[in-house]
Image (spheres, rainbow, N blue to C red):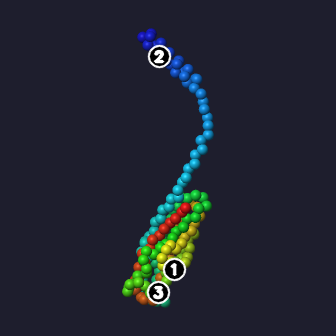
Amino acid sequence: MRFLSSVVVTSAVLSVATIASAETASGTVVVAATFNSRTSLNISTDVLQFDVVAASEPAVATVDFSAGARTVAGAQVVLSIEPIQDVHGPHGPADAESSLTFSGVGEGTLSGTVASSGLTAAGRWTGSGLRHGRLVFALRATAVGSYNVPVRFVLTAP
């Protein structure tokens, strides 16, 4: 038993001696991290539905949205809309005289005419955050009836 206790004591002393003789080193490590922007978009509908009751009155459709972005400070966040196909009415494609406009309700929303092809900016903000708003679309058409416009909403951040 005496032999066993002297082995334990000797090994403990050797362990302490090893720790005591270890050197301490210090230095600087530079880390570069890149974070990508993230976006999320919820919309109330992706098909604008209009009921034109008179050629003199525009038909109205609304889209509520919630747009969230996490991006670098000062970066621009853009909400865009794009018609997937031409405006279709009761007798097929709408007349050339028909027009689709929108007005934004809420901070950073825009107003304008929806381009027949390509993206049209509907909202613009700076930096990260969650934005809520509404886009009110107005369709002017010469023929009375129901019209549908499938659309795609896109939220971008650099």
- Tag 2: residue type? Val
- Secondary structure, mark 1, is strand
- The residue at which mark 1 appears reads as 101
- The residue at which mark 3 appears reads as 96
Q: Residue at x 55, y 24 (%)?
A: 19
| Mark in the foreground, 2 or 3 | 3
Splitting the image into 4 quarters, where does residue 150 fall? bottom left
- The residue at which mark 2 appears reads as 8
| Numbered label tally | 3
Residue 102 drawn at (x, y percent): 52, 77
| Residue at the outermost top position | 2
Q: Residue at x 45, y 75 (%)?
A: 83
- Tag 3: residue type? Ala
- Tag 1: residue type? Thr
Residue 105 visible in the picture = no
| Real-space CA distance between mark 1 and mark 2, rounded to the nearest whole angstrom | 87 Å
- Secondary structure, mark 2, is helix
Closest to the observer, 116 or 107: 116
The answer to whether the residues at label 1 and label 2 have Cβ atoms under 8 Å apart is no
Q: From what the image shows, is residue 70 above or below residue 53?
A: above
| Real-space CA distance between mark 2 and mark 3, rounded to the nearest whole angstrom | 97 Å
